[in-house]
Image (cartoon, coloured by chain):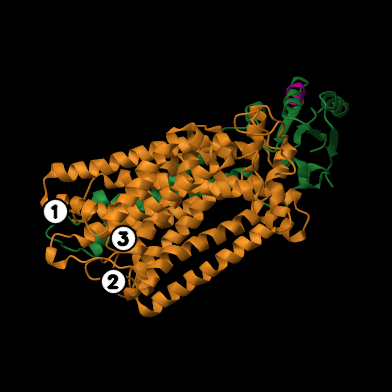
Chain colours: A orange, B green
Amino acid sequence: MSPVLDPALPAPYRWIASERASDVEMTQAIADPVFAPVGRAWWIAVLVSLPFVLWFIGSIGWLFYKGIGIWGINSTVVWGVAIANYVWWIGIGNAGTLISSMLLLTRQQWRGSINRFAEAMTLFAVAIAGIMPIIHVGRPIYAYWLAPYPNTMALWPQWRSALVWDFWAIISYLLFSIMFWYVSLIPDLATMRDRTRTRAGQVLYGAFALGWRGSARHWNRLKTLHITMAALGVPLVCSVHSIVGLDFAASLMPGWQESIFPPYFVVGAMYCGFAMVIILALAIRWGLNLQAIITANHFEVMSRILLMASIVMGYSYATEWFMAWYGGQHSDRSVVVFEFTGTYAPLFWALLFCNVVLPQALWFPAVRRSLPALFVICVAINIGMWLERILIIWNTLSHDYMPSVWRSFHFTFWDWSFLIAPLGLFAFLFLLFVRLVPAVSMFDMRELSHKEGAA
Amino acid sequence: MTGTLIAEFQNPDMLCAALRQVKEGGHHALDAFTPYPIEGLDAELDIPPSRIRYAMLAGGLIVAAFAFALQWYSAAIDYPVNSGGRPLNSWQVFLLVPFEVGVFAAALCGVIAFLRSCGLPRLHHPLFEIPGFERATQDHFFLLVAAKQTGGAIRDLRDVLEAAGAAVVTELRQP
């Protein structure tokens, strides 16, 4: 429990579960965990995640040395875990900025409790996602050929290629997300600068706070910039994941060439990303003692969004099946039959259970308010969404137009490595993040506290 | 400027009340420093509306136009690839990259314009010398005011601020 803010049950205010949360208490509750000595739980988490980081680095090294033949891909199923990972990670990466911008534009006051770490989640996930296409291209030393630059070969990138769109989308989005995150971090860095007692903290927080004084003019400009960036961020996020959808939809393969793919991928990204935000919110709430700031009501509203997204996902799956039947193409219908009954059918049924059936439990208020149940559902959604992405790849490639080339994908050790090890890297980066900057936006929470009358 | 005072308040309501009285007394309210944005304070202080969005629009459009021109030049002029007689200027798909980089450029221009209009970044500011000013980013609310240019106005201004509940009033002098 936080030594500063006592969580009171039932919550006296809608978004703050504490009788009183003055400016100084709010600041202390969020900033003190950063200054406090490192606890045992943090060290254990770091020691657990560090081997995964090394494993990931080692796997990339081995891949660079041996080539992509170490994976279970073959001449028929030419895409595998790297592409599924790419779509999955960038989906998670899309959610942070999307959630934060949409909640800002729709003036949802509860965003203050989650936006900071949701955006940090975006940065780390997009960075990991960006690695995946590079390691997938087979000759990563030439990855820079994606960039247009005057070269002795007198060549230009093929602008009509979805891979080139990906390159620009990921770079633009990653840089945009860093700026969006940093701009809203400046006032909190100034608070950290003014609270820290160490010389190194003063220098570093001071440098990154850029001389912020909290002047009325600064706040006015910050608000204008932040809301305008949010208005740009929403279409940017949608376009980024739409382009990921176009990687598939711009092909001529059965099961991929569908106009529903871009919006369906965007909803999938938001769905899986929101599930990840809830998992991280549970971890941060417990780890940093923020029970008064991330309340049961926050989980309640996030669960409702998950429920809505699961229904849209179910509707999208049904639309795909219907269109395959209605389109009348034998190859399309055959892929759908293969999904339900073919080699990967058990995984497909698991996907439907995780993404569509299990989240229906969120109709019940008791489930929405039970944190263990919510955790299980969110983990299941993330697994289900990964299965969805890998099955989009496997089902189509394994069941192409030409029956004579039909083959299956078989997992190798290195497929498992690239699936599991990045999770450790993500956790490791997140652990560093919560020790370096306030995981919740302090100025937003002060404002919210005054609005709620808790200050 | 001589006759400049900075007053420290414990809550935003006191600051807003003091601001109104300062203006009624004919003095000048220069700026306020608060731990979170106070609604309506920028209007009270007559802060002109920001022009950040124009910079964002211009930067975004220029970079997007450049990206489109680059694609058009490289695909239609410098390195034409005739693929089944399809048009070289595939402008529909050439719109994707300009959109992505245009949004990024708009955001970058916005951040630069934001820093410029705030006078940031800077390593130091004279206000940081004021004892207790570090609470402006935590829980106290500061009002920066200048006395009107008449004799004894500074004393009057100090009285107004103290009557409005200022915990500390500090006079700023040039070194």
Report the side of A298 relative to A75 (left or right).
Answer: right
**The N terminus of chain A, quarter of image:** top right
Residue type at mark 1?
A: Ser
- Residue A139 occupies which quadrant of the picture? bottom left
Residue where numbered disc 2 is placed = A154
Where's residue B85, x and y in %? 12, 58
Residue A78's place in the image compared with B115, above or below, is: below
Report the side of A184 relative to B147 (left or right).
Answer: left
- Within 10 angstroms of label 2, few (less than 14), some, or many (20 or more) residues? few
Report the magenta stretch's main SS: helix
Query: Does residue B90 appear anywhere in the picture?
Result: no
Question: Which chain does tag 3 point to?
Answer: A
Q: Which residues are magenta?
A: B18-22
Where's residue B74, x and y in %? 27, 61
Residue type at mark 3?
A: Leu
Residue type at mark 2?
A: Ala
Residue where numbered disc 1 is placed = A331
Residue where numbered disc 3 is placed = A163
Which disc number belongs to residue A403? none
Distance in Å between CA atoms under marks 3 and 1? 25 Å
